Amino acid sequence: MADIRAALRTFYDGEMTDRASRPVAPERVQRLEDFLSALRERDATSVFEVGCGAGRDGAVIQRAAFDYTGVDLSATAIEVCSTLGLRAVRADATHLPFEETTFDAAWSMSTLMHLPNDDFGIALAELRRVVRPGGIVDIGVWGHTENRDWSSSDGRFFRHRSDETLKEELARVGTIVDFATWGWLEDAGHYQWARIEVPSQ
């Protein structure tokens, strides 16, 4: 696991500055706008992001007048976010440095699919712990029609889940109130997104 995280840090530290200038996919832009609308409807004020990266989503969230906090494994990501005026700390998704029910909502895109073994489940438990009852959590990951582990040529580890497997695991956080896929590839890989509501009790 240490090697997997080290490879991730090395990759993202090396390309984070370039990532800051890349456009965000239209579907993700729309999902973020929908997320912000849902927060306003719920009178939410604080948002937490796992895998803040170059702060592209965080900047949008903060401009929308929400109290934003992000975490990332990459030290370079934290530096880039700081230059944007975003509150961001270096931390692992499986060990969040926050008290219970600190945030009204959470957002995590293209991050949690990198976790090996049962770390995904641990990260989900952490998200449920730091988001208040009744809050929402939006999660997006790359998945597949079959469950599989693989590593890219740059050394990054991926765990892809089928839609049904992902839904079963996300149920650890709460009730899935929306689920969608897009970006289907020839090998059946595709992007998976879900909105989960944390139980009120």
Image (tube, helix red, strand yellow):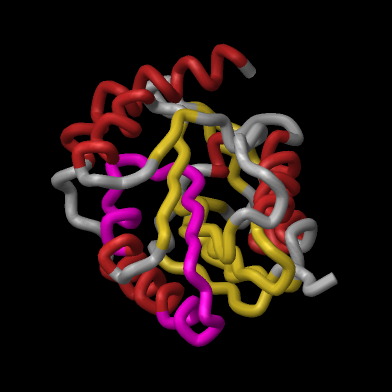
Instruction: Write down the quadrant of residue 68 in the picture.
Output: bottom left
User: Could you tell me which quadrant the C terminus lies in?
Assistant: bottom right
Q: Is residue 73 above or below residue 20?
A: above
**What residue sits 34% from the left and 28% below the top?**
12
Front position in the image: 47 or 114: 47
Based on the picture, tell me whether residue 40 belongs to the magenta stretch. yes
Q: Is residue 165 visible?
A: no
Task: Tell me where residue 42 appears, x and y as whole percent.
Answer: 55, 82
Q: Is residue 148 above or below residue 167?
A: above
> How many numbered tags mark residues here?
0
Based on the picture, tell me whether residue 187 belongs to the magenta stretch. no
**What residue sits 46% from the left and 29% below the top?**
90
> In the drawing, does residue 178 fall left or right of residue 12?
right
Q: Is residue 190 visible?
A: yes
Q: Residue furthest right?
A: 201
Task: Tell me where residue 2 appears, x and y as whole percent.
Answer: 60, 14
Q: Residue furthest bottom?
A: 41
**What residue sits 76% from the left and 66% below the top?**
174
User: Could you tell me which quadrant the N terminus lies in?
Assistant: top right
**What residue sits 42% from the left and 82% below the top?**
37
Front position in the image: 152 or 38: 38
Instruction: Write down the quadrant of residue 87 in the picture.
Output: top left
Q: Is residue 129 above or below residue 8?
A: below
> In the drawing, does residue 47 fall left or right of residue 66?
right
Q: Which residues are magenta?
A: 37-60
